Image (spheres, grey):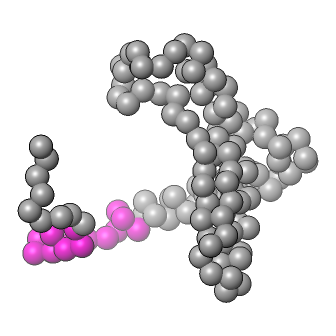
Amino acid sequence: MPGLTVDGCDVMAVYEAVMETAKAIRAGKGPALLELKTCRWRGHFEGDPQSYRTKEEMEEARRRDRSRGSRNSSWTRDGKEPELEALRGEVKREVQEAIEFTDKSDYPPQEEIFTDLVYAEGRAAR
């Protein structure tokens, strides 16, 4: 199976990889694997002191997080700011449509509360 490894901290690199991979899949080239290498710069919970990480590791994770400064991305430097703004607008419209759809939708019937759950019977936490 073809695969691609991408810097998961680079929003536009992820976007381009997903678009390229989706195009290949839609063209009938079969499944593909995308590996997005990223890091977490916040703790496991709000207020986590992150004593398991050094200050340098946390600073490096923050530095690598390009999503916070996507206006300085390669797309902006390459003069693709209009495309980036169009993409932002499209995402905002899709999110708004999803919100409106859910606001207008009825709750499912109560008898379906356990439909489509994924769990293993007979297993318990130890």
Residue 55 visible in the picture: yes
In-front residue for pair 60/111: 60
Q: Is residue 49 left or right of residue 28?
A: left
The residue range painted magenta reads 101-117
Q: Which residue lies at the image location 63% right of the left edge and 23% below the top edge?
A: 60
Eyeballing the image, is 112 above or below 90? below
Q: Position of residue 113 (x, y in %)?
A: 15, 68
Q: Position of residue 21 (x, y in %)?
A: 68, 69
User: Which residue shows up at 61% across the image and 19% down it?
Assistant: 59
Q: Quadrant of residue 106?
A: bottom left
- Residue 117 position by quadrant: bottom left
| Residue at the spot 24% in from the left edge and 73% down from the top edge | 116
Quarter in which the N terminus is drawn: bottom right
| Residue sitting nearer the eye, 120 or 46 | 120
Nearer-the-camera pick, 82 or 40: 40
Q: Is residue 84 above or below residue 56?
A: below
Q: Count every numbered label the image shows and give the total.
A: 0
Looking at the picture, does residue 50 appear above or below residue 23?
above
Which quadrant does the C terminus fall into? Answer: top left
Magenta residue check for 9: no
In the image: residue 36, left or right of residue 79: left
What percent of the width, then of the height, locates residue 111? 10, 75
